[in-house]
């Protein structure tokens, strides 16, 4: 069994490393035109027919028939009943995770989510007004697996940011409702929830129907149809990001038990066959130990087939010439999850520029961040951490510039503005500024 795992091993010092590295990084995000066409048709239908279209697609794709959209809405009482029905350990875990996520985002709000202003020397007021969005929609996957943690990570920062109404959509194939997801919606303070999913749910949130209120922004992960729909409705509403397959990159110095690192690589590989798990390490002997642990532990995993496909298709163990080179390669990849599994993680953290989340030290498994550490687990993927950030309270706010020019300030700014406006050939702009000048 162990010898049959075809896991890519690379050496950063070899002549063909760059070519192999590029093949490793490659992931085709090309649009499937069949999916795009179907999604376009679904969205157009939902926009035109509203509830009727959503009911039709829910019956067709989820096997869930209902006479009205009201029958697909989860009441607050039903969410509370689900919370009461789960086991006491589950209730405690949900509440503890929610408390930590809420505390982190409250601190985030205090640090970066407040209005501010100042007056310059002539009395002109300049600043920024920060206001929450009125209504947001959160998409919670509900097909192959259920994700109560995604409910917490999307709804709680929206709630902390001050969003007035949070609308949750979650598919329930054949009417099978996950009690933990419903309980999480209760704990997180979801305003309304509907058992619909797919492109039709995205369309309902974006355009609004007689029953589902239109929202200002849609957040949360989903399958290819959901991603395509979010991409298409962007502009009508805001979206958080278009997420690709999940990723983990571990930088190790050889001091962490190999079994820990092997299992951390599994933690992302088990998501799906396209997930990516990579180890960077300057110690060849340690890489061999991790490889042995992978081979030994893989048969014990319930999702062994998925893990195997992920590791063989997109995984890699990479021997680097130093920890510094490992950090350089990590920055080129810009992974979603980055573990610094080192005895001195703070020595290497300053060298790391691009990652969705950075997990410092051997005890900081990525899985803790997924559920209960506090920071958001909705993270940029596919190298987009080079220019984007984790989901946060700032995603549920908008900013308006504040400008109040004093009479004295108009005498200074008016001359500048008029000169530039005449240069652009916009005489109306120039005259509007000049009319406020004292002659």
Image: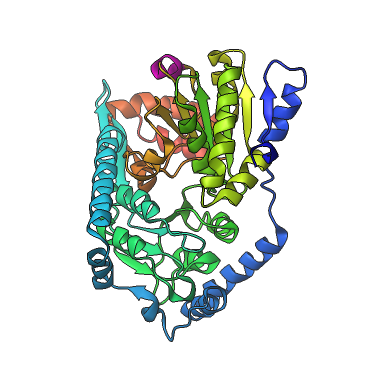
Between residues 5 and 369, which one lies in front from this camera angle?
A: 5
Q: Is residue 135 left or right of residue 332?
A: left
- Quadrant assignment, res 315: top right
Q: Residue at x 56, y 55 (%)?
A: 227
Q: Which corner quadrant holds the C terminus?
A: top left
Q: Residue 313: x, y in percent?
A: 68, 42
Which residue corresponds to the image point at 44% horizontal and 20% vertical from the top-left? 342
Specify whether 82 is left or right of 230: left
Nearest the viewer among 111 and 192 is 192
Q: Is residue 383 visible?
A: no
Position of 73 relative to 371 (above/below): below
Direction bottom: furthest residue: 67
Q: Where are the magenta residues, as a range?
A: 344-350
Residue 264 placement (x, y as % from top left):
48, 36
**Is residue 284 shown above or below 73?**
above
| 370 in magenta | no
**Whether residue 326 is visible:** yes
Q: Position of residue 250 (x, y in %)?
A: 51, 29
Side of 128 where 243 appears, left or right = right
Magenta stretch: helix, strand or loop mostly: helix
Seen from the viewer's position, the closer of residues 410 and 299 is 299
Colour scheme shown: rainbow
> In this rendering, is residue 348 above or below 417?
above
Q: Is residue 242 above or below residue 83?
A: above
- The answer to which of 396 and 438 lies nearer the viewer is 396
In the rendered view of the protein, which quadrant contains the N terminus? top right
402 on left or right of 303:
left
**How many marks on residues?**
0
Q: Residue 74's x, y, as percent?
A: 33, 72
Residue shown at the point (43%, 86%) measured from the top left: 67
């Amino acid at each position: 069994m162990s010898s049959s795992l075809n896991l890519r091993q690379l050496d950063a010092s070899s002549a063909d490393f760059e070519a192999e590295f590029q093949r490793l990084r490659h992931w085709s995000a090309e649009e499937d035109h069949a999916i795009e066409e179907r999604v376009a048709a679904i969205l157009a239908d939902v926009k035109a027919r509203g509830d009727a279209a959503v009911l039709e697609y829910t019956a067709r794709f989820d096997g869930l028939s209902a006479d009205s959209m009201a029958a697909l809405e989860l009441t607050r009482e039903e969410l509370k009943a689900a919370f009461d029905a789960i086991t006491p350990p589950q209730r405690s875990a949900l509440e503890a995770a929610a408390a930590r996520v809420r505390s982190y985002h409250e601190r985030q709000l205090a640090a970066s989510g407040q209005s501010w202003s100042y007056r310059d020397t002539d009395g002109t007021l300049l600043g920024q007004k920060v206001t929450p969005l009125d209504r947001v929609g959160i998409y919670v996957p509900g097909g192959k697996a259920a994700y109560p943690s995604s409910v917490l990570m999307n709804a709680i920062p929206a709630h902390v940011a001050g969003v007035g109404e949070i609308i949750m959509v979650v598919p329930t194939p054949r009417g099978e409702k996950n009690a933990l997801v419903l309980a999480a919606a209760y704990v997180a303070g979801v305003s309304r929830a509907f058992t619909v999913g797919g492109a039709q749910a995205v369309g309902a949130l974006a355009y609004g129907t007689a029953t589902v209120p239109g929202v200002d922004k849609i957040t949360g992960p989903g399958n290819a149809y959901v991603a395509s729909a979010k991409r298409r409705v962007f502009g009508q509403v805001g979206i958080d990001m278009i997420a690709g397959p999940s990723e983990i990159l571990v930088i190790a110095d050889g001091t962490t038990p190999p079994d820990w690192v092997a299992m951390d690589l599994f933690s992302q590989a088990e998501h799906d066959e396209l997930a990516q798990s990579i180890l960077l390490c300057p110690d060849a002997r340690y890489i061999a130990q991790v490889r042995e642990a992978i081979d030994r532990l893989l048969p014990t995993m319930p999702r062994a087939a998925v893990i195997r496909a992920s590791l063989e298709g997109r995984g890699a163990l990479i021997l680097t010439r130093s920890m510094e080179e490992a950090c350089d390669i990590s920055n080129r990849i810009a992974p979603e999850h980055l573990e610094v599994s080192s005895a001195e993680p703070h020595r290497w953290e300053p060298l790391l520029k691009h990652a969705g989340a950075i997990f410092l030290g051997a005890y900081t498994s990525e899985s803790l961040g997924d559920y209960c550490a506090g920071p958001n687990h909705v993270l940029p993927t596919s190298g987009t951490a080079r220019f984007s950030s984790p989901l946060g309270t700032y995603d549920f706010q908008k900013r308006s510039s504040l400008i109040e020019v004093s009479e004295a300030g108009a005498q200074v700014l008016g001359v500048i503005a008029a000169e530039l406006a005449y240069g652009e050939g916009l005489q109306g702009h120039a005259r509007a500024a000049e009319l406020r000048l004292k002659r």
